[in-house]
Amino acid sequence: MFVGPSESAVLQLEDPDCEEGSDPPCESIFSLNAEKILNQAKLFVEQRRFPFAVENHNTNEELAIGYVLIGNGLYDEAIKHFSLLLQILSPLGRISEALSDLTKAIQLQPSARLYRHRGTLLFISEDYIAAMEDFQQSLELKKNQPIAMLYKGLTFFHRGLLKEAIEVFKEALKLKSDFRDAYKSLGQAYRELGDFENAMESFQKALLLDQNHIHSLQLRGMMLYHHGSLQEAIGNFKRCLQLEPYNEVCQYMKGLSHVAMGQFYEGIKDQTKVMLNDPLLGQKASSEYLKVKYLREYSRYLHSHLDVPVAEYNVDQDLPGNFKNHWAKNLPFLIEDYEEQPGLQPHIKDVLPQNFDSYSAEVQKLICTADRLGALMQYDTLGFLPNLRIHRAMGLATIEVMQAMQRTWSNSKVRVNGKTRQLQWRDMFDIAVKWRRIADPDQPVLWLDQMPARSLSRGFNNHINLIRGQIINIRYLEYFSSILSFVKERLLVYHGAYNLRGLQEVKQALENVNKVEDLLPIMKQFNSKTRDGFTVNSKVPSMKDPGKEYDGFTITITITITGDRVGNMLFSVETQTTDERTQQYQSEIEALYKDLTAKGKTLMLSTELGDADAVCNLILSLVYYFCNLMPLSRGSR
């Protein structure tokens, strides 16, 4: 049974006699000391000075702690605390009951505080649209509320509406110029947008206000890693761990950064610390804990091959099949009869730091050329942070692939994966993948058809959510209009075949559809079988066998049931890769590569521009089939 959230029952986050925006500014009435936070929470429980009180004493203490955290300005910690509590309360129906009580209170006597509290509860329930509306109502009733403005911005951020979030975070900073968490959230939004400079500036301002803010250090370090600035990233992770020695994210990322730089002793030591941090009974393991065993084993493998030329070993053949399968699928490390990789061997030394100025002029020129070539591979769209390390790696890969192709067209052999032979199409991709693995060892880059036979028979699915409920995947926003046009086209083909009499009506209705979300009502209107969703399949035409088509990807638009909310839309793209489908695409690539080799040899003896165009077209066609086999929409990664 809940206590009705009357105005007097709601937690006072600031001194009630202090006016916001006054000089000196209002301060929290709580201490940041953990013991005092717990004592304050217990006092609130005894006095029932917080909303949503229940009969269960332990639950009341947990609720009170969350509000005390907000009172201390520890918004990240409060969100984590409430999210964990939500997992416990939601199945019991208490969240819905609390929202109902708040709604009744607002109907009786609306206030900025009640709207803010209901908005907070809706926010932790992930109903971001309703939460945003409540925060807006609260701000209209009482303008000077930086916390409410921050949370309003976070509702946009969590929906993937990053530009809108940025503008609201800036508004929060107008209300409170020293608002550390607003700067941190602004930095996070810029980072997700792919704007490194503005993100860096925002994180810097947050840390100038509080040099010990762990979350800002963690986020800045991760951004620096994914920007390719590994040494700077390590500095942030070290500081993070000085302040919070058991921070798994900082420990994992520090270990990853060291390994990526060839500092295996330090890196594997960090990874081992994460492995030893076992989750408590009933506690969900972190993603870092689940990944770290794979990273440590792969790090050991790389270290044992550090003095072996990269052309002499083959990751796909050397690593055990079950290890690769579990790693690619991000499964818990439960592998029967697994034999660990060799431990660190003292005679194999770490990679020494290199100075660009110490390189010869020829090597410097090669690196600069690689940087220019690699930068051309960056997606010029929202959501992709430029990674200068990946740019350089992909530029060097481009140069090496072209050198290998040139030797092949001159009838020379190349050394790949420990063998000297005529270059095959797989070898060409292996050269590029080698550089990708060196640049970032965190993600498995493996040939699917070299997985265990049992795993191959089940297939590998690549699933991408474009819209899930209220959340938009900004990285794929540029594709939305193209996908919408494609779906409309396929729907007209379908109705032309099965609903010829209603075709004109369907066509007219589709002309008025400008958003993916509006497609489902149209389909329900004209096809009773649609019910809660539909799928559209793409086809890829064969060049080798004209008239033949291969399965492409599947677009799904459906209504899902999520938690206690019905009616969330799921708009997704999925590629189902089976052994049969893989062989179909590989036969296409094989034929194109054979033709490319023949025309490349002709090009070596020709000065005709037409021959160069023919080679370029074949290269583009080969990449087209490779990417359709399994989309690789990772930007600079």
Image (cartoon, rainbow, N blue to C red):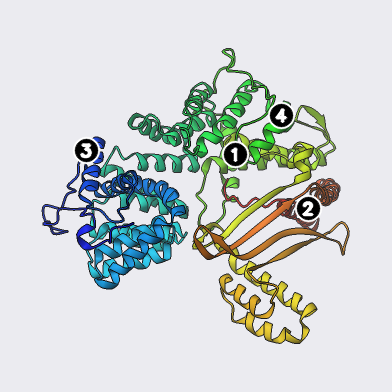
Quarter of the view holding residue 416: top right
- The three-letter code of the residue at mark 1 reads Gln
Indicate which disc, 2 or 1, sits on the residue closer to the N terminus: 1
Instruction: Name the residue tied to disc 4.
Output: 320
Kind of element beneath mark 3: helix
Indicate which disc, 1 or 3, sits on the residue closer to the N terminus: 3
Cα gap from disc 1 to disc 3, whole angstroms: 43 Å
Closest to the observer: 300 or 334? 334
- The three-letter code of the residue at mark 4 reads Pro
Indicate which disc, 3 or 4, sits on the residue closer to the N terminus: 3
Q: From the image, state whether disc 2 or disc 1 is nearer to you.
A: 1
Q: Is residue 631 left or right of residue 172?
A: right
Instruction: Name the residue tied to disc 1.
Output: 443
Position in image of residue 574 (x %, y %): 67, 56
Instruction: Name the residue tied to disc 3.
Output: 36
Kind of element beneath mark 1: loop
Closest to the observer: 391 or 126? 126
Position in image of residue 91 (x %, y %): 47, 53
Position in image of residue 616 (x %, y %): 75, 54
